[in-house]
Amino acid sequence: MKVLFDTNILIYLEDFSEIPVDLQELLKIFKKNGVSTYAHPSSMIDIENDKDEERKKVMLSKFNSYPCIENAPKPDAAFINFIGTPKSSNDRVDSEILYALYRNCVDFLLTEDKEIIKLASKVKLKDRVFTIESALGYFENLYEKKYPKHPQIRKELVYSLDIADHFFDSLKNEYPEFTEWFKKISREQRPCYVYRENGGIKALLILKVEDGSIETNQGLVPANKRLKICTFKVERFGLKMGELLLKISFEFCIKNNIDEAYLTHFTDGEDYLTDLIADFGFRKVGKNKRGEEVYLKKFICDDANLTPLQISKTYYPSYKDSKGIRKFIIPILPKFHDRLFPDYAGRKQSRITDFGDMTEFSIPGNTIKKAYLSHSPIRKIREGDIVIFYRSQDKQLTALGVVENAIATSKIEDIIIAIEKRSVYSMKDLEEMAKKPVLCILFMHHFYLENPINYKNLKKESIISSGPQSIIEISPEKYTKIKELGGLDERFIVD
């Protein structure tokens, strides 16, 4: 596996300051597992521009100790059209480094440059670009443990949180009234979702149901019952916590018959949150009086002309299931089902948003975007197709998703790139899988069947004649029976 170091990573490693602990741990993992690291020849330009003469001298003397990408390709016109014309020498270097990833000179890019991360989104490379923090989470899961580590997010009451925690400093600075608001919702016994690490808060979600209109500088958003995501803050994006917090918010809406959600946010131009919420259908509708941008998401699709995948992304959890869309049953062993769907366990999907007993649940398997690997020879699965998972030993249909992409390969490097940051597989799993051709199915998990359908009923309804041993395509008529027996919510189905 090949990882390209951006210039800022090289500077971390070679200047006089202490190397961050996370980077130290990451380098240990790379060395232990034979991950090759590279510099880009254009980084020399960045180093030459360093105004710290002493550091520049040291860096130039050490740069040649790193293997460089040979004959690094220069960005072509199409790539520049995607990312925009570089406005400075630094921009040009950034584009050349990112282009090396685009041309698959390496597998991943490690950077702390938020501008590069933004550019990566434009050319659909963001899942192959890591910060130090996100890289450590990914490679620890890949190499260090048999199973991915699952940090726990707990549902608690706001009054259990310590407002003196440094986590709240930025919120108190941005919102002068935050402390009084925090006291108010504490007295209301408002629930929240929180992740702690080493005694400190690292992620927090606070929700509120509203039914009024929303005032913006672009006009009034009409009154409607909608969920306000009051507080959404994540300090550990590398663990996909942001996606899990969104999933919690969406499931709350599903359970409580809420068709819209919104949040307000001061955007700083280098913003992980706006990229994240855009992936799940939040659209900017204006600014409020405070100057925050207002982002609104709808769950019910009002444009049936969109492609199936566009509907899934824009109006999630809504999905399209018209007759032209293929449907497949995928058998999956319980041990992989448990990793892919860790919140299932035979319980109804609304359990994590029941504001009753305190609960906790884990990631990364418990997110929306997932990857499943199979040795099935089938090659008909395409973007927008529907996949329904059959838990083999339990003999039940359990979960439904919509395919984002399907990739067939027999190279472990290609598998790692294909499944990107959504993997729940260890390197040992991947090495074993790669002994035969592998089908990588990237999909969005939409629903668990309200009523899981067991083998007896599947056979009785002539949906299957025997327990599926590999992926099978089913007819529209059989899918309709599954939809009826499984109790899928018709509000979110576009035909």
Image (tube, grey):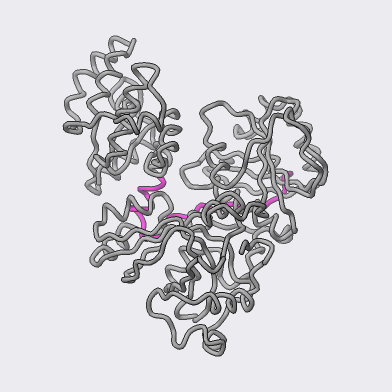
Viewer-proximal residue, 218 or 71? 218
Residue that appears at 77% across and 48% down:
209
Inspect this view and state whether residue 241 appears: yes
Which image quadrant for residue 371? bottom left
Up-down relation of residue 320 to residue 42 (above or below): below
Viewer-proximal residue, 338 or 292? 292
Which image quadrant for residue 166? top right
Residue 192 location (% of width, % of height): 69, 48
Residue 311 location (% of width, % of height): 57, 53
Q: Which residues are magenta?
A: 137-159
Question: Was residue 143 drawn as part of the magenta stretch in this picture?
Answer: yes
Question: In the figure, is residue 54 to the left or right of 257?
Answer: left
Viewer-proximal residue, 298 or 428? 298
Question: Was residue 222 drawn as part of the magenta stretch in this picture?
Answer: no
- Quadrant the C terminus occupies: bottom right
Question: In the figure, is residue 137 to the left or right of 210?
Answer: left
Residue that appears at 63% across and 63% down:
493
Residue 418 location (% of width, % of height): 35, 53
Up-down relation of residue 313 to residue 450 (above or below): above
Residue 18 location (% of width, % of height): 35, 26
Inspect this view and state whether residue 200 appears: no
Residue that appears at 56% across and 66% down:
322
Up-down relation of residue 97 to residue 208 (above or below): above
